[in-house]
Amino acid sequence: LDTLPPLQLAQRYFTLFPQQREPLWQNPCDDKRHRDIWSKEKTCDRLPKFLVIGPQKTGTTALSLFLLMHPSISSSFPGPRTYGEVQFFNTNNYLQGIDWYMELFPLPSNVTSDFLFEKSSAYFPSEDAPRRAAALLPKAKILTMLINPSDRAYNWYQHQKAHEDSTASRFSFYDVISAQHGAPADIRSLQNRCLTPGLYHTHLERWLTHYPVNQLVVLDGQQLRRDPAAVMDEVQKFLGVTPHYNYSQTLTFDQQKGFWCQLSEEGKTKCLWSEGQKYPPMEPEARSYLSRYYREHNIDLSKLLHRLGQPLPSWLREELQKIS
Ligand code: A3P
């Protein structure tokens, strides 16, 4: 038997198995050997039963607000940094370990009927998130919300501009999306963050290499905006959460905001702050550029949704009609 002092042995080991340099957390209660050494003070119940993975600007905050109206659904506490999102599986927060993660969740009062969740909209396009999430939460349901990727890109750009991103403030939307290889690094980086999450098919395939198809649902963000009660019915069915909550009685359309809002028992409305109304519609030139840009990806997405037996959202049918 060949051996070495501990530090050299570790170095040798990680040279042989570089993919193991980073931990891959699993649920300690899923393995007897881990359970046996897991502190009696700790629990494995403070883990989410489902994740809302994004992508950003598709209506995921509204979905979270509506989910929280359900009496059996609770979310994580706000994460310490990233705009209240936990962003565990896609960032260095992951290296803080599972205690760090679990402490961001309340203790469920009834483990069977309570549903904990977290919404981190940067999980969707993340290379790491699906593998890491599936290792810790193999039974979790995964909710993703899609709108037309061209609209998503435009809303995202406007969001950056409203938050005074210096590149978004200096360059028009069209400049950003159409920047070519030789363009300055800051535009290329903004372009990448603007357009890449819209490659829906690629990201979904990555999630599906780690989760079975029946644990993933693709929701239509445009439908959530138009008819949230119908989407929330679909979500409740998919999650298997009880009791059935009647959203058509507790959501109200606010004419001034142009959005559906929560109606409290006292008759007050709670709406989300939204930038949507404040920016002009996308220029036709940018829209046709993006329709071409996303063309093949949208075709692949439609094939994927067929395979999953999930309906095509209306925006996707419209994009496909532009092609034929
Ligand atoms: P804008 O802010 O550009 O209008 P996310 O929370 O995933 O980042 O998505 C934000 C988008 O959700 C908003 O984009 C808005 O269009 C959309 N949305 C859908 N339903 C909404 C609702 N009931 N209230 C507020 N925004 C809603």
Image (cartoon, grey):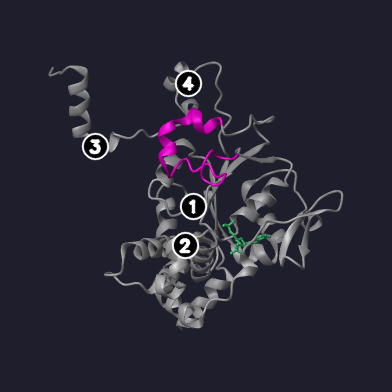
* Marked residue nearer the N-terminal end (4 or 2): 4
Residue type for callout 2: Arg
The answer to if 93 sits in the magenta stretch is yes
* Marked residue nearer the N-terminal end (1 or 4): 4
Assess whether mark 1 and mark 2 are in contact (beta carbons under 8 angstroms). Answer: yes
Residue type for callout 4: Arg
Graded by Cα atoms within 10 Å as few (under 14), some (14 to 19) or many (20 or more), the crowding at tag 4 reads some
* Marked residue nearer the N-terminal end (3 or 2): 3
Q: Which residue is mark 2?
A: 307
Graded by Cα atoms within 10 Å as few (under 14), some (14 to 19) or many (20 or more), the crowding at tag 3 reads few
Residue 91 is tagged as none
Assess whether mark 2 and mark 4 are in contact (beta carbons under 8 angstroms). Answer: no
Graded by Cα atoms within 10 Å as few (under 14), some (14 to 19) or many (20 or more), the crowding at tag 1 reads some
Q: Which residue is mark 3?
A: 18
Residue 213 is tagged as 1
Looking at the rendered image, the disc whose residue lies closer to the viewer, 3 or 2, is 3
Assess whether mark 2 and mark 3 are in contact (beta carbons under 8 angstroms). Answer: no
Residue type for callout 3: Pro
Q: Which residue is mark 4?
A: 35
